[in-house]
Amino acid sequence: MTTLLGFLGVLAALLVAAFAARAAGQRTSNAYLRDMTFAGAFGWMLLLAALAGGVYLYAFVDGAVFFRWAVQFFAVAAVAAFLFRLAGRSVGTEATKKGFRQMPLTASFGLLTILLYALTAILAPLLAPYGQSEVVGTVNMLPGGDPATGGDPAHPLGTDQIGRDLLSRLIYGAQNTVGIAFATTCIAFFVGGALGFLAATIGGWFDNILSRAVDVLMAIPSLIFALLLMTIASAWAGNQQWQLTLYMIFIIALIDSTRVFRLARAVGQNIVVMDYIEAAKLRGEGLSYLIFREILPNATAPLLAEFGLRFCFVFLTIAALSFLGVGIQPPLADWGTMVRDLAQFINFAAFSPLAAALPLMAAGAIALLTVAVNFVVDWVLHRSSGLKD
Amino acid sequence: MSNVLRIILQRLALGLLTLFVVSVVIFAAVNLLPGDFAQVILGQGATPQAVESIRRDLGLDQPVVLRYFDWLGGALTGDLGTSFAQANFASFVGEGAARGTTVMQQIAPRFANTMFLAGVTALIAVPFAVGLGILAALYRNTAFDKGANVFALTSISSPEFFLAYVLILFLAVLNPILPSLSNIYAGMGLGERLERTLLPALTLTLVVTAHMMRMTRAAIINLLASPYIEMARLKGMSPMRVIVKHALPNALAPIINVIAINLAYLITGVVVVEVVFVYPGIGQLFVDSVKIRDIPVVQACCLIFAAAYILLNLVADILSILSNPRLRHPK
């Protein structure tokens, strides 16, 4: 109740301040200040209040550890993205330099993040201090590496419920979660893209049968369908954990290939009515020539953007399945499973903020990559469509 | 008018057909199980005799097509069978395997809970998203618009459990305003119930708001170039009035469409969020049954989710036809 009253009080104060600021602005000769609307003045007041509140929280409130971390993270990310863009403008070929010159900061941040994730995934065995399923220390060791609170400098993020090093598992998670999602997306694209182009080129009954089948599969929500098929897969796999992971890859690839099929077919259909396709057909070119030499090169831009978005969806589905306990199976380190296993640490936020941050780190690693991919896809779509608004 | 009615009936028939085919897919998928239900129920300790008796109890000795229509007929009349866990328990107690609590009895209260959660979410999310979208269209290309865009992109891209745990951290653990577990039971007061539903509802709001907001903004901005908007502006109307009185009614069709589609999306999101908050809804029952391979429950939940999804998409389809004269009177 007091929170609500406080909120309303701040709102009223802001409204009064905005009114006063506007009245003062109308007396000046500056055109922008004189013609400012009340809503505009309120927006500026809101921004000022948010800034003041942020500075107060950052500097004077001891409990706002998470806020401080978030601000520091944003600052580091912004500076890194800026430096990355600066480096991209002076290194590389003429074409990449031009790309970097026109790039917004969000896209350069996205590119940098994707690059870092890829490097972490490839170099995981070198970066991680321990193996991903190696039991190395006492169980549930607190993070921070401070011996006074029961930590160990050798395990900066502590250990999990059976004594595995969490830092190593976080790093290996990049390899497993991202790698599996990437492989799944590739399979979905290969199957969906190939069938979509075939349906567009051949048409007729082939197109009809495939399209109706895809319509039916798309009528079931994807996560629900994935869970249903995973139930059956878990019966097939028995106690073979790695088999279940393999089945999951194929199940999600199947479900997502329907979406790719839709797009590939739509894009392909727009291309097959072109005159150059007609000409190629009259020349007597075969199906593979038509698809690989005529359709594919003209469909690259939308398909690439779709690949980014599809990767996000696959990645989030796999993370959700793992979080629910039916996705990537235990010996492999995986972010979704880690969130579930570490979730109860969040209740200790008041005593050990770092411990409470552990599940958020794993979940945030997932969120950060999807945000980065979305930033890049947004920029690519914006550039290829030539949109200005 | 009869034209509209015919289109709606056509869509309804198409929706029913889709639902029928989907039920075939669900049934067929489950029948891909190695061995059959009887072995799944009994697990390791299956003797040929016990398997035979359970097969007879469940009617598994019948041909597949007959069993499908039996299941479908049961589902239509509200009989979704008995869950394996319950059947196991009943046979342990000494009743017949086909008795015990039915799936229907298990699902009905949870279905009501899930509908309550979805309803609360919709009540918060729809006005919030549409309002934010209108504001973003009004102040397009300003810092506010860009901030709203980044917020939308971030909340679309984050997994539901990330948003859920961030909300738990700030609203339940660091500042204990709301309970972090949604412990809901029958006969609870509405106020208390709302309080415990609020945190999952807020999480789902964050998940669905972004898309609705961006579509509202895009739909309104699309219209701003039209001559009648320019006319209204030249008359000296305030920008807010131009958007709310002139642009919004014409942008209603795509907005209603995207709201319905997002409510359909809620159905998927609800599964993860219910598990995070231990909310006693249908999504949690579904996940638990998937883990213990309780086929009748999985089948029933899957059918309900698919039916709700198809229904909402159908509503979106019909509403967009009704609100667009060009679709109402096709040439």
Image (cartoon, rainbow, N blue to C red):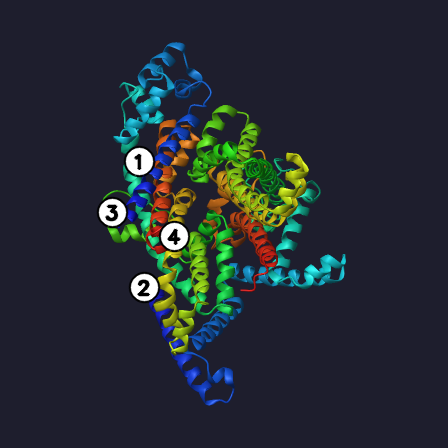
Q: Secondary structure at mark 2?
A: loop
Nearest to viewer (mark 1 / mark 3) = 1
> Would residue B280 be seen by someone viewing this image from the given angle?
no
The local secondary structure at tag 4 comes to helix
Depth check, front residue: A239 or B151: B151
- Sequence-wise, which precedes: disc 3 or disc 4? 3
Give how far apart the Cα atoms at labels 2 and 1 are: 36 Å
Q: Nearer the viewer, residue B147 or A203?
A: A203
Q: Are marks 1 and 4 on the same chain?
A: yes
Q: CA distance from mark 3 to mark 2?
A: 22 Å
The residue type indicated by label 4 comes to Asn
Q: Position of residue A17 (x, y in %)?
A: 41, 79
Q: Earlier in the sequence, mark 1 or mark 3?
A: 1
The amino acid marked with disc number 2 is Met
- Residue shown at 42% from the left, 32% from the top: B290
Q: Give, as a three-letter code, the residue at label 3.
A: Met
Which marked residue is nearer to the observer: mark 3 or mark 4? Answer: 4
**Residue, disc 4:** B257
Residue type indicated by callout 1: Ile
Q: Which residue is mark 2?
A: A1
The residue sitting at 34% across, 52% down in the picture is B329
Counting residues from the start of the chain, the first of labels 1 and 4 encountered is 1
Few, some or many residues within 10 Å of mark 1 (<14, 14–19, 20+): many
Q: Which residue is mark 3?
A: B188
Whether labels 3 and 4 belong to a single chain: the reply is yes
